[in-house]
Image (cartoon, grey):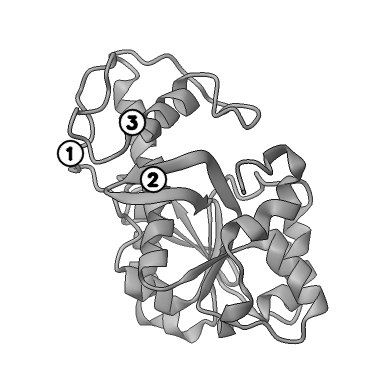
Amino acid sequence: MFAAQMPDVAHHVLVIDNSLPESHRADLDRGVELIGGSNSSWEFSAWDSGIAYIGKRVNDYDLVHLATSAFAEYTPGHLKLIDQNVVRHLPGLNAVLGHIDFYNEPMSVFGIPSQAWLRSSFLFMRPRHLQALGSMVGVSGGAPIFSGDPLAPFREDAPISRSYRQFLVGWLTGTGTGQGPGWHSRFDLTDETLPFFESKARAILNEQMLTNRLLAIGTAIVDVTWLARKARTADGISLGDIPDWRAQIRPRVGPKFARLLA
């Protein structure tokens, strides 16, 4: 896709397959490599494996594109918005590009209030952001979150708000969030499914914490649709041109969510 839309943009592709042994290495095609991943923290540990594999070569790139198998799960036609005109603005910005999503109300994760995040399925960032983060995994398996009881899966002292707990249970096992269709792979929470629930919930927490950690190092978050629209009308874009996330996505989500974005 990118080769067709951006013929003047040189790129290299590294595929990390969590179903393969970590020691696996293969060349799939010219400029396309394949390695294995541990799947200890879903895509986040896979990205750590990829970053470690690339090593210092990462500094040879203007941008790093992180994607998962769900990269196409956005609004219709969003991939067509990313062209050379959009990409040329990013290296000059202290910003990460992706699809901004939001909760109906603010949540709290590890004491940090949050209402919006960048979906981890499709991100563009500069190498310096990867280096500043250190690891893409922000919530490890040892974090004191889960109780081991499917009837009350979170510890009483878990460092996430009650509203976030309700969101995680509702999204993974219930009717969703009230913003539209629920998750496509909902399941009943039982003793048998509890390990998967904990693993998937931790992945969602890692997704939120990735945005929180980026904001903590002074990085702006930028919505794909907003930047595509802005890039068509601006010769240059500075960090000061990037508005609050609510202003960025308001035209995209329309009047249905106007109250939530006020």
Q: Which mark is residue 144?
A: 1
User: Is 254 above or below relative to 174?
Assistant: below
Name the residue rendered at 43%, 58% in the picture.
211
Q: Nearer the viewer, mark 3 or mark 2?
A: 3
Amino acid at pointer 1: Pro
Disc with the residue nearer the chain's start (3 vs 2): 2
Task: Determine the image quadrant of residue 224.
Answer: bottom right
Given residues 190 and 96, the one toward you in this image is 96
- Counting from the top left corner in percent of width and height, residue 23 is at 31, 56
Q: Secondary structure at mark 3?
A: helix
Disc with the residue nearer the chain's start (1 vs 3): 1
Disc with the residue nearer the chain's start (2 vs 1): 2
User: Is 165 above or below relative to 83?
Assistant: above
User: Is 199 above or below relative to 98?
Assistant: above
Q: Nearer the viewer, mark 1 or mark 3?
A: 3
Task: Determine the image quadrant of residue 247.
Answer: bottom right
Confirm whether residue 245 shows in the render.
yes
Q: Which mark is residue 155?
A: none
2 and 1 marks in contact (CB < 8 Å):
no
Structural distance between the alpha carbons of marks 2 and 1: 19 Å
Viewed as shown, does residue 229 lie left or right of 19? right
* Image quarter of the N terminus: bottom right
- Counting from the top left corner in percent of width and height, residue 215 is at 41, 65
Name the residue rendered at 49%, 39% in the picture.
105
Q: Secondary structure at mark 1?
A: loop
Structural distance between the alpha carbons of marks 1 and 3: 15 Å
Residue carrying label 2 = 42
Residue carrying label 3 = 162
Amino acid at pointer 3: Arg
